[in-house]
Image (spheres, grey):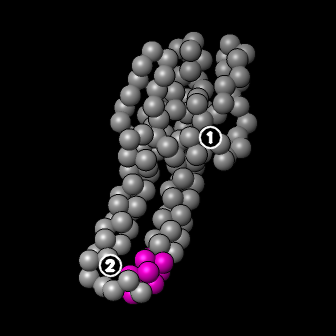
Amino acid sequence: MLVTLIPVRYKSFELKPILYYFAKDLIPMQPITRSDGQMEPRLEFFWRTSKMFRRHIRILTALDVFTLECEFGLKLFYILHFDLDKTVVLSNITLTIVGIVATLCTIYYALWIRKKVKQEEPELLARDAVSGA
């Protein structure tokens, strides 16, 4: 996940945060019809035209990376300070709690991003029509 936050561009290739790819694959959205009549996937349109969308997808990915690293740190602490049986129990409890909290926070933040982008969409479409992209 962390590697996908590195801004890599090579010719027409651009590395995007992994949560962008998850959203692209898991969230069904109608494509955008651009002013030139071309159809474009909605998330690609948002990525191309909205700085806010790009920034918050990166922030969301970074928060998930941070959460997973903290969970790893807790497990390492358990390994170094407790016997094997207690470590296994604590690791499973930690994974469950962190997984549920991280998933709920990610969903909430993603819905917030979606709301903000929907508000911004008419302006993005108008700006895109003027730029002729």
Nearest to the eye among marks 1 and 2: give it: 2
- Residue 90 is covered by the magenta coloring: yes
Which residue is painted at 31% across and 68% down in the image? 73
Give percent across and percent down for residue 85.
42, 87
Which residue is painted at 50% across and 68% down in the image? 99
Is 89 left or right of 118, judged from the image as shown? left
Which structural element holds mark 2? Answer: helix
Which residue is painted at 53% across and 64% down in the image? 103
Give percent across and percent down for residue 75.
35, 72
Task: Name the dominant secondary structure of the magenta segment.
Answer: helix
Q: Residues within 10 Å of mark 1 (few under 14, many from 20)?
A: some
Which residue is painted at 49% across and 17% down in the image? 12
Question: Magenta segment range?
Answer: 86-94
Number of marks in the image? 2
Is residue 123 something that shows in the picture? no
Three-letter amino acid code at the position of disc 1: Lys
Q: CA distance from mark 1 to mark 2?
A: 36 Å
Is residue 80 something that shows in the picture? yes
Q: Is residue 72 above or below residue 14?
A: below
Quarter-of-image position of residue 69 = bottom left
Q: Nearer the viewer, residue 10 or 37?
A: 10
Give percent across and percent down for residue 131.
53, 14
Quarter-of-image position of residue 90 = bottom left
Q: For mark 1, what is the residue?
A: 24
Three-letter amino acid code at the position of disc 2: Tyr
Is 73 left or right of 113, judged from the image as shown? left
Is 112 left or right of 56, judged from the image as shown? right
- Residue 132 is covered by the magenta coloring: no
Q: Which quadrant holds the C terminus?
A: top right
Q: Is residue 103 above or below residue 39?
A: below
Q: Is residue 116 above or below residue 105?
A: above
Q: For mark 2, what is the residue?
A: 78
